[in-house]
Amino acid sequence: MANALNTITVDGVTYNAAAYESSQTKEAKKNDDLGKDTFLQLLVTQLKNQDPLNPQDNSSYIAELAQFSSLEQMTNVVNSLEDLGKVVGNIDTSVLVGQLSGMIGMNIDWVETINEADAEGNPISHQEKMTGIVSGVTIVDGAPTITVEKDGQRYQVDIANIAHVYESTTEVVE
């Protein structure tokens, strides 16, 4: 005889829990998390199908509810911390963009990695020191970069590649 704790009722039909679980496709089971609705359905099913002459102790139901509530609260805390991490990341990016904006109009030296191919078509790369004037700040793929003009060309420079920042030494003669 099936125990009420190892059965599940779906659309009015009661199944052996192990057989039902094995019959479900992995696609239907998106993950192993037990959602609120599923937990409550299982709890109600257990209550409906328990032996009235030998009922389960109420303290075990209360313990299950307390555990589920604790798990839900921990999940909420984790989600809140993830959201907080995103906010802090956005603040850090905003502060950095503000600081980089102070570089507009200044000269910088940076290292540019040049990817080429040799005579046989094998990829080679080398680094070249470049100098230009900062003309703007942009965010590319969530990371701040600076726009630099050199000889009429624009370059997007990752801030990690900046070697030196300095003011222009050329004087304007009127």
Image (cartoon, rainbow, N blue to C red):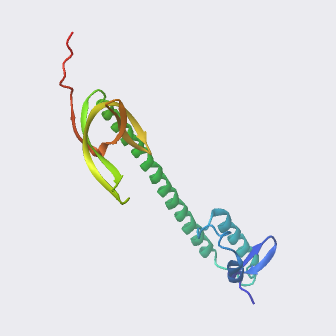
Residue 81, percent from left and from top: 44, 53
Residue at 80% from the left image edge and 70% from the top image edge: 11
Q: Residue at x 75, y 84 (%)?
A: 53
Q: Position of residue 108 (x, y in %)?
A: 25, 35
Nearer the observer, 14 or 86:
86
Where residue 63 appears, as percent x and y from the top left, is: 57, 72
| Left or right, 21 with reference to 82 | right
Residue that protrudes farthest toward the top in the picture: 174
Residue 51, compared with residue 125, is above or below; it is below
Please tell me in which quadrant of the rendered image residue 21 appears.
Answer: bottom right
State whether residue 85 is above or below residue 8: above
Q: Nearer the viewer, residue 160 or 16?
A: 160
Question: Which quadrant holds residue 161?
Answer: top left
In the picture, the quarter occupied by the N terminus is: bottom right
The residue lying at 66 percent from left, 69 percent from top is 27
Q: Quadrant of the C terminus?
A: top left
Furthest residue to the right? Answer: 12
